[in-house]
Amino acid sequence: YKKSMGVNKGALIIGGGLAGMTAAIDCADQGFAVTIVEKQGELGGNLRHVHTTLSGKETAATLDALIQKVNNHPNIAIHLNSKIKSVSGYVGNFKTELDGHATPIEHGAVIVATGAEQYEPTEYGFGKDERVLTQQKLEDMLHQSEAATAVASLKSIVMIQCVGSRDEARSYCSRVCCTNALKNAIKIKEINPKTAVYILFRDIRTYGLREKYYRQAREKGVVFIRYDLARKPRVQTTGGNLVVTVKDVMLGRNVSIKPDLCVLSAAIVANPDNKTLSQFLKVPLEADGFFLEAHVKLRPVDFATEGVFVCGLAHYPKDIGETIAQARAAAARAATVLSKETLESEGKISAIRAELCSGCGLCVGVCAYNAIEIDPIKNIAVINETLCKGCGTCAASCRANAVDLNGFKNEQILSMLSVI
């Protein structure tokens, strides 16, 4: 048999950055009620620190227009300075409580767009010498006319790639660091071609059509020096001067540079709130703390937990275009739930034999869909029929044979075997 259940037409968006706002507008434009929960006091997220795209387009106008559209949309409610307190329910019928809010939010789908953060470097003298800064800080300076002129008047600038990523602590590539370094290097060269810009890299990852900006940087005189992980650059202060020493892989010898600025391309690291949120939503994280999708190719914005979707930097480091594409995909997937009047459970789902169940909880731990809970009063397992997908893992793992898969009960299987 199949059990039907009504669907709440609301969507909860966790995060008010580029991904969250894009997904919210897509859902709201389809007539669904949307609630954005943002822990900061303003919308915008990391896009507030990105002033231009790689092609040189200003982002401020786009961001302002996006925020204005979200604020003025009749189907979007916004909670700033808010954090998730608890999440209960299941696909089509979630209930979320916020810190400081008495009334819980009821919704049928969740889109996780919590973003990510910049790694705070501990190496290369960062925090000890004001001449050592991050690419994000450099971009802020280049966006201000006086500061940009001051930066471009310097004789030499060194940029160090892969700071905090592609090492023992974080094996992944943050993907946008190379293009950000190229963007800032090209900008400096455009203001003052005489400023020497050196990029110390392990691998330049300007994938896709971004390769033309690498060629453009080379044509403008940016010098690229390759180093390997075993011999990272050294940054020292000698006689009041910064001295950057690196072994050039191509030349096979050490090169010393005395730059006026040392710019670090810091990694993108997962939001520290992800762990708590993953427990609320019963969704997994990968080893580096980013949210793990159900399948990288077949279900790239879904979780195994039905009704919960992911997009943006919460999922993995990505650029603006990729973030927008994934946010719209998450909104489209959420709409497949919200557009329905009712949801039907699977026909072949698990069932508990109460007289045999001891409440050990083994089935709870193995269920990939979080469809099983232990009743605290009866101390037996309880199946959520809407979430259960009939995979049979619980039935196979139960030592007391207290779990049956409808259509495949022990008596039915034995009956079929006796006919053979």
Image (tube, rainbow, N blue to C red):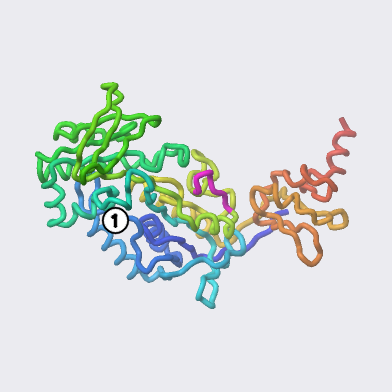
Residue 81 sits in quarter: bottom left
- Mark 1 surroundings: few (<14), some (14-19) or many (≥20) residues within 10 A: some
* Above or below, comparing residue 230 to residue 26 in the picture: above
Residue shown at 71% from the left, 52% from the top: 364
**145 lies above or below 164:** below
In the picture as drawn, the residue positioned furthest to the right comes out as 418
- Helix, strand or loop at disc 1? helix
Rendered location of residue 70, percent (x, y): 34, 66
Q: Is residue 397 left or right of residue 114?
A: right
Residue 324 visible at all: yes
Quarter of the picture containing the C terminus is: top right
Magenta residues span: 283-289
* Front-lying residue, 99 or 248: 248
Q: Tell me residue 208's x, y (percent).
A: 31, 34
Q: Residue at x 40, y 30 (%)?
A: 230
The stretch drawn in magenta includes residue 324? no
At horizontal 72% and vertical 50% (from top left) the residue drawn is: 349
Give the residue number, with chain letter if any, for mark 1: 49
Q: How many marks?
A: 1
Of all residues, the one furthest to the bottom in this rendering is 102
Q: Is residue 301 left or right of residue 127?
A: right
Amino acid type for the residue under numbered disc 1: His
Location of residue 379 (image quadrant)? bottom right
